Image (tube, rainbow, N blue to C red):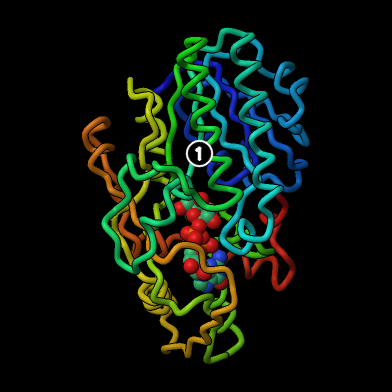
Amino acid sequence: MIKNKKILVVGAGGFIGGHLVKRLLENDNSIIASDIKPKEYWFQDFDNAENHYSMDMKEINNCRKIVKNIDYVFNMACNMGGMGFIENNKAECMQSVLINTNLLIACKEEGIKRYFFSSSACAYNKSKQQEVFIEGLKESDAYPADPEDGYGWEKLFSERMCRHFMEDYNIEVRIARYHNIYGPFGTYDGGREKAPAALCRKVIYAKENNENKIDVWGDGKQTRSFLFIDDCIEGTLRLFESDFSEPVNIGSDEQVSINQMIDLIEDISKIKKLKRDYQLDKPKGVRGRSSNNDLVKKVLNWSFKIKLKDGLKITYEWMNSEINKHGSNLSRFTKS
Ligand code: GKE
C-alpha cells in the first residue's frame, strides 16, 4: 500500500474521504485534507493531517492554492446523498463538475502524477436497471449513455474529463464506480442518508419507541448491492496502485431487495417483525442494481469480503450508540 507520500484528499470531511484519510495516515503518508464543510461537520477529523476546513473546490483559486508539492490527489468530493437527495437536487449535484474540472486543471499545472476520481453506479445506463433482479452491471454498461439524471450525468461526464486529461496531459487517472457504500460515520438522518442507514435508523427508533411499523420507500421489492466501507477503502487503494486507468466497479455482487435488507436489520436488532408501510410516491431510483465484479477480480485480483449481514451489524451498533448520544437531535453528519 502507498507509503511515505504526500497526498491531498479532497472531500476529507465526508464519509468515504474520512475513512480514506485514516487508512492513509496509518500507512505513514502525509495528508493534506480539505472539505467544503466547516470543522464541526467533518465526519472524522485527524489531528495528524493538515486540515483545511470550509474550503470550496468549486473555486479554482482554492484548487491552485492547495495542489502544491503533492504526490497524489484523491477527489472524494461531491454534493451527494441517497435517492431522497439526488432526485430533488439535480442542479446542485451537477455543479460538482466544477470540483473535478478545477482540480484537474490545478493538477495539470503542478504536474501531479496520479489522480483518483470517485464515480458512481449512478453512471450506468438506466435501461439496464429496469428489472428487479438484473445481471450485475458491467463497466461497458455505462454506454450508450443514459445515466441517472443530474448526479449520474455529472459522474459520467467527469469520468470522461479524467480520461482526456490522461490522454492529453499524461496525468495517470484511476476511477472507481462505487456501489452504495455504507458503514460507521455515514449520514443517517437529515435527508441525505442512503437506504442502509435510513432503515437502520427507522428500526432503532421503532425499537426505542415500542412502535410496530416503519415507512419504506417504494414497494420494497427493488434491489441493490451494498458495499461496506472497509472493503471500499481496500478496493480504492488497490485500484489506485494498479496500472488500470479505465473505470472499475468497486461494489458488492450480493444483490438483495430492500425487504431482504430490512429482514437482516430486524434480526440484528432482535425486534419483532415490523409492519412495513410502503410509500410508493417517495424517490425510488432504478428498479434493480448490482455490481458485476469480473473486471475488478481480473485487474486487481480482489473482490469484496464483508457480507451485508456483517457490515449491517457493525453499522447498526455504531448508529445505535450515536443515536443514544444525540437523542432526537440531528446528528453532525447531516451537513452537505
Ligand atoms: N434513502 C432511502 N431512505 N431509501 C429508501 C428508504 C429510505 O427510508 N426506504 C426505501 N428506500 C429505497 C429507495 O427508494 C431506493 O429504491 C433504494 O432504497 C435505495 O435507495 P438509496 O440507498 O437512497 O440510493 P440508490 O441506491 O438508489 O442510489 C445511490 O446509489 C449510489 C451508487 O450505487 C445514490 O443515491 C448515490 O448515493 C450513489 O451514487
Under mark 1, the amino acid is Leu
Q: Judge whether 223 appears above or below 215 on screen.
A: above
Element type at mark 1: helix
Q: Judge whether 177 appears above or below 263 on screen.
A: above
Q: Position of residue 132 (x, y in %)?
A: 34, 69
Quadrant housing residue 140: top left
Residue at left 59%, top 12%?
108
Nearest to the observer: residue 154 or residue 204: 154
Q: Residue at label 1?
A: 156
* Residue lying furthest front: 144
Q: Position of residue 202 (x, y in %)?
A: 56, 76
Label 1 Cα crowd, 10 Å radius (few <14 / some 14-19 / many 20+):
many
Residue at left 34%, top 67%?
131
Is any part of residue 131 visible from this angle?
A: yes
Nearest to the observer: residue 204 or residue 299: 299
Q: Position of residue 280 (x, y in %)?
A: 54, 80
Q: Judge whether 104 appears above or below 95 on screen.
A: above
Which quadrant is the N terminus positioned in? top left
Q: Position of residue 171 (x, y in %)?
A: 49, 14
Q: Judge whether 166 appears above or below 335 on screen.
A: above
Disc 1 residue lies near ligand 1 with CB under 8 A: no
Nearest to the observer: residue 214 or residue 104: 104
> Would you say 78 lies left or right of 288 here?
right
Nearest to the observer: residue 126 or residue 265: 126
Residue at left 45%, top 26%?
27
